[in-house]
Amino acid sequence: MTTDPTGTRAMTVDVRRGTYRDSVGLMRVSREVAALDGVEAALVAMATELNLGLLADMGGAAPADVGPNDLLVAVRAVDEEVLAAALRRADEELAAMAGGGGGGGGAARAPARTVRAAARAAAPESPPTVALVSVPGRYAAAEAFDAMDAGLDVLVFSDNVPLEHEIALKEAAERLGRLVMGPDCGTAVIGGAGLGFANAVRPGPVGVVAASGTGAQQLMCLLDAAGVGVGHCLGVGGRDLSAEVAGRSTRRALHLLDADPGTERIVLVSKPPAPQVAKEIEAECAALATPVHLVLLGGDGTDISAAAAEVATALGRPAPAWPTWLPDEPVRPRAGALRGLFCGGTLADEAMVIASAVLGPIASNIPLHPDDERWTLDAGLRSDDHLVIDFGDDDLTAGRPHPMIDPSVREERLAAELADPACGAVLLDVIIGHGSHPDPAAGVAAVLRAADSPAPVVVTLCGAEDDAQGLSAQAETLRAAGAEVYLSNAEATRRAVALLTAP
Amino acid sequence: MSGESALLTTDPSVVSVGAGMFADALAAQAVPVTRVGFRPPMGDGSLDDALVRVLADPRRAAANATAVERVLAVRPQLVDVRPAGEALGLEAGDFLHAGPPVDWERASGPLRGALMGAMVFEGLAADPDAAERALASGAARLDSCHHHAAVGPMAGVISPSMWVFELADPATGRRSWCSLNEGLGRVLRYGAYGPEVIDRLRWMSAVLGPLLRDAVRAHGPVDIGAIVAQMLQMGDEGHNRNRAGTLMLLREVLPELVGGGAPASDVAEAVRFVSGNDHFFLNLVMPGAKLMMDAGRDVPGSTMVVAMARNGTDFGVQVSGTGDTWFTAPAELPDGLYLGSYGPDDANPDIGDSTIAETAGIGGFVMATAPAIVRFVGGDVDFALATSRSMYEITLAENPAFQLPILDFRGAPTGIDVAGVVRTGVLPQINTGMAGRVPGTGQVGAGLVNPPARCFALAMAALAEAAPPLSTR
């Protein structure tokens, strides 16, 4: 423990060796501790490179030999007394985490340590059917293999899973007759249950295969608004249709849906696949008994909203008008650059495809043209011109929660953009549903209200009315703070572009 | 395992590993969810690719099923008691020892002490000092018991004139051997070599061995597997407590011992010796376990451990899919209770082949079934229950023949999976005795120990080498 020369500040960095907790839970502990009166900063986190950087920013240092399996408890407080109280609080919170909902009583059994053991320990009246893997990416494949060994299908939510691990997993799944959803599979709906990030959409005859998490969420929410229900949504991971992974999970998911008597139409949502994979998948789709809509984002100008409308009309619904929630006072257009701040990668992609058709190059950390510097953002994520940032990209989520869970990083950037005179309009997404932050609109609205004469803000609100956060309630919060709110990301993007190019 | 997925046709029930919020979200939707207490695997990231390569090996599932099936099919029977020279083909100057191979230079105190005693016992040295000089100059040929289908507790020294139990599996004809147990305290296996040790060994070869031989031959094969199954239901775990097993063995052969026509005083002494030594049956548990585990050897692609053994210097592990290679690391000091005034400074690092019991799923793995000894090895009953339960996380099968009443007659956790150990960081639990560090001391205590994690890391790397490489397309 060290006290600074003025004698009024106290700081400590504890290392708990070999104590592992998941990063999301630790975020909560950090917040609880940081919220105590007199605590200036608190970091309760695994000693990953990123967190050691955060510790250094706090003015602390850890021993050189700590590693990602060691837990850091670092607190800076106004005096020693507060510091001691903060450490006690951290210990209480950590102890509560370790309880982990494992069931009451002092003699409660430790939770199973492996998927296989957990599958055996599950209630016999509801034998497990699927494993949801959300451990850090480099550990995810081992858990998924264990799940398949236990006879389960698997959803790998984790990102940063090495490509060769993904291929090995999917080859094994083919051999074992299992489905591997993901990795980096943000969403799935199976028999009405939402896994990962998912919306409470109405049940119905559409089956979705998605190589895109937020793309699938947007599609399902739009279909829901059009009165069309979804029976199952099987995510396959963003790389599934690459030349390397060769659509292994897509094929399997298509066949599962084709064999499902409740599925009348299939929608396949993906970025444009590798050409040879596209050919195979198209042949595969043509051979199915169930009609398939191929939605290849960014390829031929198809956007998700157009595809949703097409599916709705194919099912005999009237052409939908997507809901909007507009502020009482119309926003005032102004000159400047487009600043897109997204949590959803596919929504960011779709926005760039639509906007760049009018605005020209848009710089991004997930560039449409990676080899062209006009389209790429450096690690500082700064540009004076049009830019779109995907805060959910692997590089920005290593060692921290996804921005749909913890929106603070994006909120900080939103405040900065609103204060930037070069910013002509901000386009952002707010995604609700299972797994998402309990009230993401509140944070965005607070930033909007705090801003002085801000640039216009256009929001894609992706959600369903039955989501716990409430679609209308979230929309109202945003609208009341002055944002234009759209259910359709394509419409929101066109509106933002229109604001920039208004005469 | 394989077959069409019922994913879309049955109500979902989820096993969730990782972020608790996703499990919470499922519970909020009234979807049944079972949580996993995940911890990162061993190796701080260095083994992740090796682990995936091994888990992806298409041979693995079938190979492990085959290995386990062979292990569980073994029915160990005691078929004979013979001099080791005859049974194992040992000649004067041959000495087998516990654990992976080691030379005199690196041999631990208790192993040196046992070898010195054995040299005197074999008449190859006049006294322990002379034996030490002869051993240091390379007079003896040392080899691992395990290389000869044999096992020996603690130092595990077997020399030609010692008598051994001979076990056989009737279905395969496979055999295994183990020395006769000398009792507790100052005994050769704990490194003691005083005159009382040598005298006892001479009596065992002259009287006890032949008596047991005649009794076993007259009785016919004794079903060791059946006795192990029963002792586990009578408070023994088959490593540090063998009281029920010892008495059941005696019950089996007593009529033949008594009726064999040997002098009544010899029979009385033999019976007194066996029934007064609660560990006598350990030397039958061990070759029984050895017979089982040897049956699981050499299945390409199998990640099952087939031997764990220590020589007092190194802890060694052998794995089915990697042949006879030993994966070794420095043996660790057990943690437990000490006899009399002995303390940690007197104890030698972990030693003996008796870990074959844990390799076969008993001993420390079934501690829950032996609450009477948990204090002796330094634990409590909750610890014993938790330990046995955790062993199911790292094993491939449950042995239906060896049941644990306290766990609702669940089968013993059997067949340590290297991948399971590396994935969970849960190390096999071993119950053990402790030998004195200084040659000649004998036993100083008993306690608990784990294999060094490094043995499993090395085994994992070798298994990965033997598995097909991961493809990047």
Image: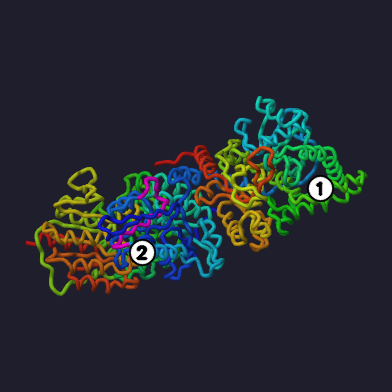
Q: Which mark is residue A237?
A: none
Tell me: A210 left or right of B329: left
Residue drawn 13% across and 61% down? A498
Q: How is the image coloured?
A: rainbow
Residue under mark 2: which chain is it in? A
Give the position of the C terminus of chain B as an image quadrant. Answer: top left
Q: Which mark is residue B273?
A: 1
Residue drawn 13% across and 58% down? A420
* Residue A67 inside the magenta-drawn segment: yes
Q: CA distance from mark 2 to mark 1?
A: 64 Å
Q: Secondary structure at mark 1?
A: helix
Percent of width and height locating residue A72: 38, 55
| Residue A214 in view of the camera | no
- The amino acid type found where label 2 is placed reads Ala
Give the vertical position of A286 relative to B213 (above or below).
Answer: below
Q: Observer-nearest residue: A221 or B442?
A: B442
Question: Local crowd at mark 2 within 10 Å, few (<14), some, or many (≥20)?
Answer: many
Tell me: B53 left or right of B162: left
Q: Which mark is residue A86?
A: 2
Residue drawn 27% across and 53% down? A57
The image quarter containing residue B371 is: bottom right
| Residue B427 in view of the camera | yes
Q: Secondary structure at mark 2?
A: helix
Residue under mark 1: which chain is it in? B
Q: Observer-nearest residue: B358 or A79?
A: A79
Give the position of the N terminus of chain B as an image quadrant. Answer: bottom right
- What is the magenta range? A62-79
Q: Observer-nearest residue: B227 or A387?
A: B227
* Residue B71 inside the magenta-drawn segment: no
Give the vertical position of A248 relative to B151 (above or below).
Answer: below
